[in-house]
Image (cartoon, coloured by chain):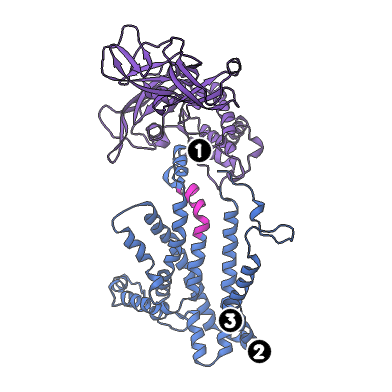
Amino acid sequence: MSIEVRNISKSFGSFLALDNVSLQVPDGELVALLGPSGSGKTTLLRIIAGLEAFDLTDESAILFDGRDVAREAVGRRRVGFVFQHYALFRHMTVYQNIAFGLRVRTKQTRPTKDEIDRRVRELLQLIQLDTLANRYPSQLSGGQRQRVALARALAIEPKVLLLDEPFGALDAKVRQGLRRWLRRLHDEIHVTSVFVTHDQEEALEVADRIVVMNQGRIEQVGTPDEVFHQPANAFVMDFLGNVNLFHGRVEAGRAVFGSLVIDPPGGLQVDGESARLLIRPYDLEIHKDNRGQAGLPARITRIQSAGPVVKIELVGGNDQPIYVEMAHDRFRQEPRAVGDEVFVSPRVSRLFVEDRQDPGERE
Amino acid sequence: MESPPSSPAFRVGVGRRRRSVLPGFGLTLGYTMLYLSLVVLIPLSALFFKTATAPWEHIWETVSSARVLASFRLTLGASFVAALINAVFGLGVAWMLVRYTFPGRRIVDAVVDLPFALPTAVSGIALTTVYAPTGWIGRWLESWGIKAAFSPLGVTIALTFIGLPFVVRTLQPALEDLDPEVEEAAASLGAGRWQVFRYVIVPAILPALLTGFALAFARALGEYGSVVFIAGNMPMKTEIVPLLILVKLEQYDYTGATAIASVMLALSFLLLLSINLLQWWSTRRQAAG
């Protein structure tokens, strides 16, 4: 079932948590709401679920398959909601937790006892916990609890599955396993899902589409590839992975960052404006000498070679920290040492003038 | 979030091999035993010893006399009903104090403690004034043919009054502990308000509710001051056990008084023990999550 959110605002006192947000989630997609804390992503999710009221205006609406559900109570919207801290019923067993949504139905709509049993057993198998049906939540690990919470939400055959930082309370290893599992699960059952996360890696790995949010607004909506490789603005680029940020100024149609000069084709028409250059750590190269290229002088302060890539920390002019990542074989070819005076130059960079992205990506 | 099943470091070492990190187990145990003995156990056992000095026939005769039996019935019955009323309405008060913010909430919160703080005789006189046939409320009740003061109903009213803070104060932390997300989860699964209350909230606060009930009940069993004024103390009708004990003492019938007291003590102990068992059973099912 598709979800459409139209012109939703929400204020807590004088704080504007959501500022006229509109969003469409096509049927069957797995969408991530990604943003720092306070960006309004959880508020948006709770509003979609019906757990939170929003500032009612004439233009605002929440549509499930084109039908406005804005005035429907949470229990009637048939949404499966998964909480960060599981919110399991502590006095019920795993089995009873999963069966809850079916057992509280009215007599007319409640499945028979056997039917409920069959459904719960199915779900227990789906979450691979069929042997733990009679355990209480306190006897389960965090990852198991979250799977139970998911099964409980799926038991009511929701039209929409909403997950609020579902892996936030788990440790790194469990989290990785569980998010792959969620991706596979979604490929099997295809229920329209929205999940909230502040972890860009999680969003990139799991979601079909990513909605990047900041300060109550949507900054960009796109596939993981789109938001990662074609960020709409400096915020999105900065949020999706580490970047080196350089501040400079536009002079004579070119952006100048100390000794590094970016000359986009066509030139810049905004002389005197401040400019920002964002470069991913793996898009920076280190050279021994300047070789006539526009490079920034820097000194190596730390080298960390344990890990998939070699991470090098440098200090440039004005004590600006610079982070560079390079492959191990590259590092072996040209070994560097702490204290070396070198030049760094970008292979690929993104130039943002006053937060408007310049179309020219420099190779 | 993960709570390790039991961390060996903090297990109190009964065996010699495993030493506890927290020192002073022996000291605190010894102190506890001494203190409990001096303050509770020795005085209470003196009661039984004193009773035992009397011939059995005399004891039996005392406690099985119609007047004593009637007072047992009244005290146990009225205390039970009062604790039950408090459990229901105390839950309401605690719910309101925890869940809602409204002007004057702190004042209401403080008023709940008044029955704790007032000298019981003062409460007794106040209640009698209000509920007597000439009092503000008693007059209304009288016009409907209900006799509040000087009847078992009056006893129940007084016992309800003094038991209220126990239920409210034990329930408040339990209600504050409730995770609002659990209720939201239940609502999102389609449970109505009543179902959320019945299947999610009540089981979670049941241990605290039982504790509050037990405390209010225990307090009511021993209450004297606030009851004797409103009860009217008519033999066979509105005489509570503590009063009867006092009456025996005034007649220098010490063994009679201790006999009644012993039976009362044994009964209270049994009742409290069974409530504790019930509570243990309901807590056992939900270890800290």
Instruction: Please provide the residue range marked out in magenta.
Output: B197-209
What residue type is disc 2 on?
Pro
Q: In this view of the protein, can residue A253 be seen by the observer? A: yes
Chain coloured blue in the rendered structure: B
Chain coloured purple in the rendered structure: A
Q: Secondary structure at mark 2?
A: loop
Q: In this view of the protein, can residue A28 be seen by the observer? A: no
CA distance for labels 3 and 1: 55 Å
Chain identifier of the residue bearing label 3 in the image: B
**On the image, numbered disc 2 is attached to which residue?**
B55
**On the image, numbered disc 3 is attached to which residue?**
B43
**On the image, numbered disc 1 is attached to which residue?**
A101
Q: Are marks 3 and 1 on the same chain?
A: no
Pick the residue in front: B190 or B273. Answer: B273
Counting from the top left corner in percent of width and height, residue A117 is at 60, 36
CA distance for labels 3 and 2: 21 Å
Labels 3 and 2: the sequence-earlier one: 3
